[in-house]
Image: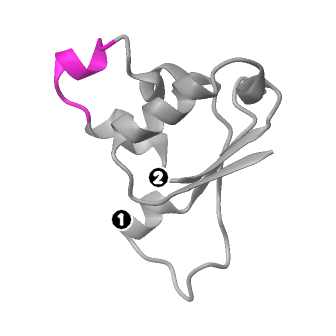
């Protein structure tokens, strides 16, 4: 497995990592990304141009993700950026 530790990275950087590993590595669960919740990007994108950008792998992969919160990393629940960060993305394309 390959672990990408990517807290607070821009969406384009996540997209580049996804495209570089697109295919069997993602399908077989060999890629694990510790980083922002991709669903948050989907919620915040307002422009039609960003939504229809064919190079945006983040929006393309969202329907196929398995995301899990990372428990125990913080002493108390928080809101905002910290909550968005605590997500593990693993086994894309697997239900």
Residue name at image x 68 percent, y 38 percent: 66
The residue to which callout 1 is attached is: 81
SS under mark 2: loop
Which range is magenta?
45-53
Give the Cα separation between the discs numbered 2 and 1.
9 Å
Which residue position holds label 2?
36
Give residue 90's position: percent from left, percent from top: 71, 42
81 left or right of 20?
Answer: left
Name the residue rendered at 71%, 23% in the picture: 93
**In which image quadrant can residue 48 be found?**
top left
**Quarter of the image where the N terminus is located:** top right
Q: Residue at x 65, y 65 (%)?
A: 70
Side of 34 relative to 90 (left or right): left
The structure residue drawn at horizontal position 38% and vertical position 52%, both measured from the top left corner, is 9
Image height of 20 relative to 74, above or below:
above
Tally the numbered discs: 2
Relative to 27, 14 lies left or right: left
Residue 95, position in %: x, y?
78, 27
Q: Point out residue 15 in the picture as x, y percentages from the top left corner.
A: 44, 31
């Amino acid at each position: 497995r390959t672990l990408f530790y990517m807290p607070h990275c821009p969406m384009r950087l996540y997209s580049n990592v996804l495209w570089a590993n697109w295919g069997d590595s993602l399908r077989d669960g060999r890629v694990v990304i510790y980083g922002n919740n991709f669903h948050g990007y989907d919620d915040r994108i307002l422009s039609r141009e960003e939504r229809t950008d064919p190079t945006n792998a983040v929006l393309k992969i969202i329907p196929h993700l398995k995301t899990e919160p990372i428990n125990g990393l913080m002493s108390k629940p928080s809101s905002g950026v910290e909550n968005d960060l605590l997500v593990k993305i693993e086994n894309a394309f697997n239900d």
